[in-house]
Image (spheres, rainbow, N blue to C red):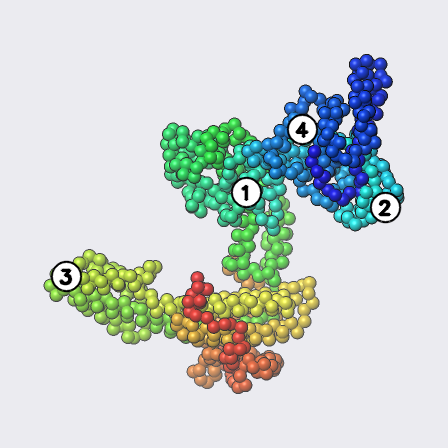
Amino acid sequence: MDRLLHNESPFETIISFHKLIESFEEIALSDVDYRSNYAKAILKEVEAYPEFRTGIHDYSIIKNNEGLIKNLVADLFPTALTHNEIKAITIPFQNVSFNYTERFKKILRNAGDEFYMEIRDFDEHQFYINNCCLILGDYYKQNLDFNRPFFYDIPDENGIEKHYRILYNADFMEITPTEKAIHLTQDDIDLLIDNYNDIDLWKSKFPKGSWILKGFGIVSLFDATTESAISNLKSNLLKPETTRVASTEIIENIFKSIFKISNLKVGFIIYNPEEEKFIRPIKFDNQLTSFLLKSDQEVDCKNAFFGCSFENLLDKKEPLVISNVKKFIEDSSNKKLGEHLLKQGIQSCVFAPVIKDGHLLGVVELVSENARELNSVNATKLELVLPYLTDTIDRYNTDMQHQVEAIIQREYTTIHPSVYWKFKKESQNYFQNINHTKDYIFKEIVFKNVFPLYGQIDIKSSSEHRNETVKIDLQNQLTALLEIFNNQKPNSNLVLLEQRKFELESLRDELEFPLKADTEQHIQRYIEEEIHPILKNTKDNAKNVKLEELYFETLDEKTGMFYQERKKFDNAMSIINKRLASVLDKKQIEAQQIYPHYYERFKTDGVEHNLYIGASIAPTKPFDIMYLHNLRLWQLQTLCEMELAHHQLKESLPYELDVTSLILVFSSPLSIRFRMDEKRFDVDGTYNARYEVVKKRIDKANIKGTNERITEKEKITIVYSQNSEEAEYLKYIKYLQHTKVLEPAIEQFEVEDLQGVSGLRAIRVKVINNTSNSEVKKITYQDLLDELN
């Protein structure tokens, strides 16, 4: 007999056979002689043990009288069924049990001496309240459905966990109150029913040991391993996205229970119909493995590795069952697959297709290290679990599609979260009308009366720097080629050698002048078509061979040309753009707290950004012009931080580049419209187009009456047209001068007339390059390259 599982209970538990003894007393008075005599004989045996009627407190009495108890309960435990039924005497919800059937004894014996039988997922809280519910049902006659399914999880002799459903028979028990019992009103009962989780309330109404549970119960188990395992599999596979899928060990234990194979292992691969490839899903990389794609992340379905073995699986959607891998290698033409499995110690396996609406979603892999342990007969059990696997993979594909669409939206389109609601609303309108016969016409996405803010940090003289690095690389490459040609043997029979040397020198001389539009392409084509064939087809002295090897090692893999100086410039450009964009994006998150607004940025030879703020973008929030002023101050502060970020980078850059900063102020509200053909927002209307013209041309403009650009390195230029804008920004500048962000000197000037636009003015002020003002830490060039990659 096992020990008690729970210590705290509303019951004082007394094991008693009084109800059974009373039934024998009735039988003893009957007219049926053999029944009467049998009952009298039992009663005579029991007479020596009054505790069997009054109640047993000392459990040793039970252990010392197992034979008598077996005779007493023989009608309830038929000998003919003892090897089939799984039954014992027990107290409900407690782990006290005895008088096991032979099958029950065998199950416990196979589980081992260390096994301790307890109800699955059943804690002290549930135990106490379920006992209270017994009282409510039996004594207070409340119709409560509180008995959820209970299970014992018991391993067999092979270590496979089997699941047994528990059923209780309480016909031989009675519940009575003690003096400590509290009488409950219907209001008390209603309060308890509405507060299942309030354990203190239940204990206050049913104090510990305030009721007597007298008698005995019968527990019957039936093997529900397959049903329970499938339920567990369903629970694990259909978890919400926020919960991780179960580990390989959990999934494999479930399949072991279903197939009754102790060494069973489970794998899985996804099928990609667009590319006709099998893929090992990265999402489940640490949870579910694959035995087909052990080292590869993906493989073509028509790969020789799968061969004709997978024709039925792919075309007819039928499982591939290999009950004996060694025999498969001997009989099949696809030895490669068999040998791949055998290397992993796999002797039998099942590869079952997972299908939804006639389409292959993936393949479930079941493998065993024993031949014939997996076969076409037990493979049919997969039909029980495939529906749940289908739902899981379908959900995985759907989730992946949604995430891919979200990534596309985030990385490749301009639908900013601030305006997403309007696109969503229009999409919902389309969705609701999709089944109507009338074609749905999409409404244009327009936001009226919004205030624009434009700013940019541009790489100063980027085109000149780019051309200069191209020239240096070309000059170095031509010089390297000339050195190789000058080291050729004098007796060389290549008559064109001198001519090629002359042409190379001529091309190098051309590079002393400004670079023309087609110069780079012309030199590249000449070298590839005229020079490289000569180098590859001539054999010369050891020194020249070394020079040629060094030359070809220096060539860039993609362009086939020298790319050293240009690479430094390109890397410097990328590093600056990435760092400045990250500062802007980070500050943008804070700016959205001021008032929701539309934001977009572009990386060109620098970083540009557009902001639009107004009531139409956030119609549920009251708009005030104060929010525009706040955003303007934020923009100026952010450009200062971006200038400081660049200053911190300059020392570490492979190629020194300066930047210029500019803000365009435009106080008139305008409308922006989403251009379906370009998939981006643009200003709407002829008058508003003036704003776009100024944006495109202003950074190349000069100070009126001079040849000096309005932008200058380490300075921020603010272009405006109205006196009120000038006064507003001078206040911002004064504040930032006070906080030691901007230098005291302020330049003010007129801007030269642009095409169709005149009367623009500008303020220019220098940012203080003080390290303490910057959040950006100094890092090495290698750190920058690591970050870039």
Of the residues tagged 4 and 2, which is closer to the observer? 4
Of the residues tagged 3 and 1, which is closer to the observer? 1
- Identify residue for label 1: 249
- Identify residue for label 2: 188
Mark 3 crowd level (few <14, some 14–19, many ≥20, 10 Å Cα): few
- Identify residue for label 3: 494
Question: Is tag 1's residue or tag 4's residue first in the polypeptide sequence?
Answer: 4
Question: Is tag 4's residue or tag 3's residue first in the polypeptide sequence?
Answer: 4
- State the quadrant of the N terminus: top right
Q: Amino acid at mark 3?
A: Leu
In contact (CB < 8 Å): disc 1 and disc 4: no
At mark 1, the secondary structure is helix
Q: Amino acid at mark 2?
A: Asp
Numbered label attached to residue 86: 4
| Rendering coords of residue 743 (x, y %) | 53, 83
Q: Is 775 rendered above or below residue 196?
A: below
Question: Is tag 4's residue or tag 2's residue first in the polypeptide sequence?
Answer: 4
The Cα atoms of the two marked residues, 4 and 2, are separated by 39 Å
The Cα atoms of the two marked residues, 2 and 3, are separated by 111 Å
- The residue at the point 74 percent across, 28 percent down is 65
| Rendering coords of residue 474 (x, y %) | 29, 68
The Cα atoms of the two marked residues, 2 and 1, are separated by 47 Å
Question: Is tag 2's residue or tag 1's residue first in the polypeptide sequence?
Answer: 2
Mark 1 crowd level (few <14, some 14–19, many ≥20, 10 Å Cα): few
| Rendering coords of residue 458 (x, y %) | 46, 73
The Cα atoms of the two marked residues, 4 and 3, are separated by 99 Å
Q: Residue 144 falls in which quadrant of the image? A: top right
- The residue at the point 57 percent across, 45 percent down is 246
- The residue at the point 76 percent across, 24 percent down is 72
Left or right: 692 as drawn, with respect to 232: left
